Image (cartoon, rainbow, N blue to C red):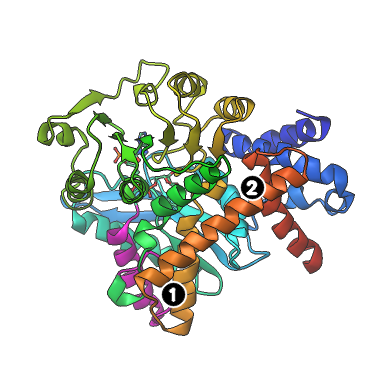
Amino acid sequence: MNDYVTKLMAHVKAKNPAEPEFYQTVQEVAESVSIVLDRKPQYRKAKILERIIEPERVLMFRVPWQDDKGEYQVNRGFRIQMNSAIGPYKGGLRFHPTVYLGILKFLAFEQVFKNALTTLPMGGGKGGADFDPKGKSDDEVMRFCQSFMSELFRHIGPNTDVPAGDIGVGGREIGYLFGQYRRLRDEFTGVLTGKGLTWGGSLIRTEATGYGAVYFAEEMLKTRGESIKGKVCLVSGSGNVAQYTVEKLNQLGAKAVTLSDSSGFIYDSAGIDQEKLAFVLDLKNVKRGRISEYANKFKTAKYTPANPNLDHNPLWDMKAECAFPSATQNEINAKDAANLLKNGVYVVTEGANMPSTLDATKMFLDKKILYGPAKAANAGGVATSGLEMSQNSERLSWTREEVDSKLHDIMIKIHKNCYETAKEYGTPGNLVNGANIAGFLKVADAMLDQGLV
Ligand code: NDP
């Protein structure tokens, strides 16, 4: 760490107690951006990074709701409006029991740079609640979403802040949230993305993050004259991002062999083909079951339950060429990274946000594998949310082919931008620097133009 980053981190830690995930993302970005600050002192003088670290606004609110037994329940809701220099706040809502201020600040901070990379005019935000949709009835989820929106509706709008889904917030939750917003505001606008196709949603939004991650991997491989075809791939998670990562891998002739949830993972040596994936979609999106059921259904698969006493995740200890972490933050630690490298993995594409610890990231960079950091590799989701916003403004719906081709084009541009920026700033092939610096420059220039606000 250089002097500037050391001082900045001491300040961040003193000012934001007990938010380790936030420190992690700030440190990674600050290390990349310090290369720019050395070359362009105007950003340092205007305290651009110091300002980006401080959210423009943080909302924290009570979410009371009633369960099916008639008992009163109370959760905590949040919205972090991080930076709106280049467009309205944009970013998902996460419903998960681990949600607290630090997790959402890390996600909102990452979102600022990611959204800048998409080429679309979107600022960064993130929100959610420490509510666990797992095991809740549809009615309970609906009552929770309605109560959550009864506060949030005051602070969002199609030109102010446009939330989307994230962990625990999929099509069902977006529907309930949108219904309550529409009722309270008495207006039908594109205030959320990830909406249903008959009420303002965009084709391909559901698929976009997973598809985009695979397009990004393909671009990285092209730089070595290779393609994803025929590659064996490890995928973690079994939610939205993981599902459509596997689908695109299948379409491009690769073989995905793993999926997981918080209870464990399956390894299917025969590959998770489209028929098996259809089973997973029904299991996870309709029946809301556990991934262990995959191994009961398909005999080529083996299920390994999660073991919290292990210092590594055995999912990352399988022979493969590519890895697509698509579950959650810090799911690849240094031991996992060592296992991946030992097993021949040389392409890591982050579908999840910040799935690799700082140590794991450093190992991937040191080994010069093809490493696609989350901000760039999973930006296809928010980019397609941006396309949904454009369609809503125009009151038009583009075809599946149109949206997919725009998504593909955006992923190619994001890769090119990160690749060229990394080279320009003296670290060729380091897409972590490329993504952080390219995202920073766009936001920083807008902030300089707009003065001290
Ligand atoms: P989903 O809720 O659809 O799926 C999440 C998956 O990850 C589930 O299989 C879940 O298992 C697993 N998971 C979540 N938390 C943990 C944990 N602590 N330990 C082990 N497994 C866990 O979420 P998404 O697929 O939408 O999101 C996955 C990741 O991708 C997140 O990091 C998210 O921020 C990121 N992302 C999502 C985008 C999107 O468009 N949806 C866009 C960009 C990034 P279980 O059901 O057992 O909890």
Q: Residue at x 59, y 39 (%)?
A: 22
> Which is closer to the viewer, label 2 or label 1?
2
- 114 relative position to 344: left or right: right
Where does the image place residue 354, in percent across and percent down from the top left? 52, 39
User: How much space separates mark 2 and mark 1, taking CA atoms?
Assistant: 28 Å
Q: Is residue 199 above or below residue 40?
A: below
Q: Residue at x 86, y 50 (%)?
A: 40
Q: Residue at x 25, y 24 (%)?
A: 305
Q: Amino acid at mark 2?
A: Ala
**Which residues are the magenta region?**
169-196
Residue under label 2, please give it.
435
Number of other residues with Cα within 10 Å of mark 1, as a class: few under 14, some 14 to 19, many 20 or more: many
Where does the image place residue 170, in percent across and percent down from the top left? 32, 56
Q: Quadrant of residue 366?
A: top right
Mark closer to the chain start, 2 or 1: 1
Question: In the picture, which quadrant includes the N terminus?
Answer: top right
Residue under label 1, please give it.
190
User: Where does ligand 1 appear, by image quarter?
Assistant: top left
- 85 relative position to 120: left or right: right
Mark 2 and mark 1 in contact? Answer it, CB < 8 Å.
no
Q: In the image, which disc is placed on residue 19? A: none
Number of other residues with Cα within 10 Å of mark 2, as a class: few under 14, some 14 to 19, many 20 or more: many
Question: In the picture, which quadrant includes the C terminus?
Answer: bottom right
Q: Is residue 392 above or below residue 205?
A: below
Q: Is residue 321 visible?
A: yes
* Pick the front one: 275 or 397: 275
Q: Is residue 180 magenta?
A: yes
Q: Quadrant of residue 189?
A: bottom left
Q: Is residue 244 magenta?
A: no
